[in-house]
Image: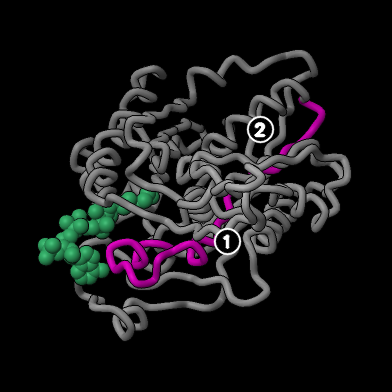
Amino acid sequence: MGIKILGTGSYLPPKVVSNDDIAAALDTSDEWIYSHTGIHARHVAEEGETTSTMAAKAAKAALEMAGVAPEEIGLIVLATSTPDYAPFPSTACIVQDMLGCVNAGAFDLQAACAGFIYALEQARGFVNFYPDKKALVIGAECLTRILDWSDRSSCILFGDGAGAVVLGNDEAPGVASTKTVAHTILGADGKGQDFIKRTGGTREALPLDPKTGIPLKPEPMLSQLTLQGHDVFAFAVRKLSKVVGDLCERLGTTPGDLDRVFAHQANGRIIEATARRMKLPLDKFWLNLETTANTSAASVPISLDQAVRAGELKDGMKIVMVGFGAGLTFAGTYCVWPEL
Ligand code: UT7
């Protein structure tokens, strides 16, 4: 009984860009990129593919696995930092239309690479409150469209893709789960706001026409990702181990009791350092960034779906999903699969 992940799905665009492809255009190499990040290649959305089309494909696969019809979905929460539009209409509304989830409310949520876990928590609250309804939680990104492809220290890190889960609750109506608070940590540290940024937005005032005082027609704003990799790296290693440790402590267990950790795939060295800090064997951590790179809010649900479809995530396994990202944000959630 309780709130459960009923199905998972993911989508990676077919086009693959290898490190060698990037090295043909920039002063870098497969050797440097792989040794500093664990990444060999990334999937890249092509003409016609957008965050919403990838999200809809991942969500459709999750609905099919769950055996849930689109009309049964009461809420879609879509975590993204790369919505189809910047930022409205929400990508969640576009996906709602694509899938025919006619009974669903829909909104986007922006918590960068920790966004999926934030979104999962919103949806958990929803199905906790409305146990007769299902929720769709999606992480989807088209990051390759906001990268500065001349900046070798950031463009090598990211890829495109989407992952999704369907949540349901088989508690009797009115019986609220007591797990929500203990099982999840959502946090932020705005002092690190400069470490990862997407430029553009409304920070800059528009120049005014000196005659009329009315704003002049705005120039198209460049919306690009900027990164202070070192600072993020240090934050990530500190936070990932702290969040997992704190969750385990709250629940009266230890990291050693976990069967799997699904950590945000930003850099293999971050995950290795986290494993070392926690004295956990690296094989407890799901690793796929060799071929997917960093897909931000999509990385945790893509990993989950890959583990489920590979038969490596079995009922009763104790897992933690944990992420960090721009903001800065951090989040973790504990789950005895598939119960949240
Ligand atoms: O999901 C959240 C977003 N993700 C992140 O923020 C990632 C976190 N940070 C990282 O993964 C790492 O900091 C990076 C992979 C981004 C950088 O690795 P690093 O070991 O911290 O390298 P660095 O920035 O200290 O750069 C070392 C050297 C520099 O050269 P000099 O100044 O020492 O001569 C860079 O110019 O490596 C150079 N460099 C490169 N060389 C070849 C940086 N990028 C590259 C490259 N190819 N792609």
The verdict on label 1 being within 8 Å of ligand 1 is no
Instruction: Mark yes or no: residue 312 visible.
Output: no
Seen in the picture, residue 56 relative to 323 is either above or below; the reply is below
**Magenta span:** 131-158
Of the pair 264 and 147, the residue shown nearer to us: 147
Q: Which mark is residue 220?
A: 1
> Magenta span has 149?
yes
Of the pair 303 and 94, the residue shown nearer to us: 94
- Mark toward the viewer: 1 or 2: 1
Q: Secondary structure at mark 2?
A: helix
The image position of residue 62, as x and y in percent, is 68, 52
The image position of residue 308, as x and y in percent, is 54, 53
- Badge 1 crowding class, 10 Å Cα cut-off, few under 14, some 14 to 19, many 20 or more, is few
Name the residue located 27 percent from the left edge and 38 percent from the top edge.
Answer: 235
The image position of residue 290, as x and y in percent, is 35, 66
The image position of residue 201, as x and y in percent, is 54, 47
Marks 1/2 in contact by CB < 8 Å: the verdict is no
Q: Which residue is mark 2?
A: 123
> Magenta span has 45?
no
- Badge 2 crowding class, 10 Å Cα cut-off, few under 14, some 14 to 19, many 20 or more, is many
Name the residue located 63 percent from the left edge and 42 percent from the top edge.
Answer: 213
Q: Secondary structure at mark 1?
A: loop
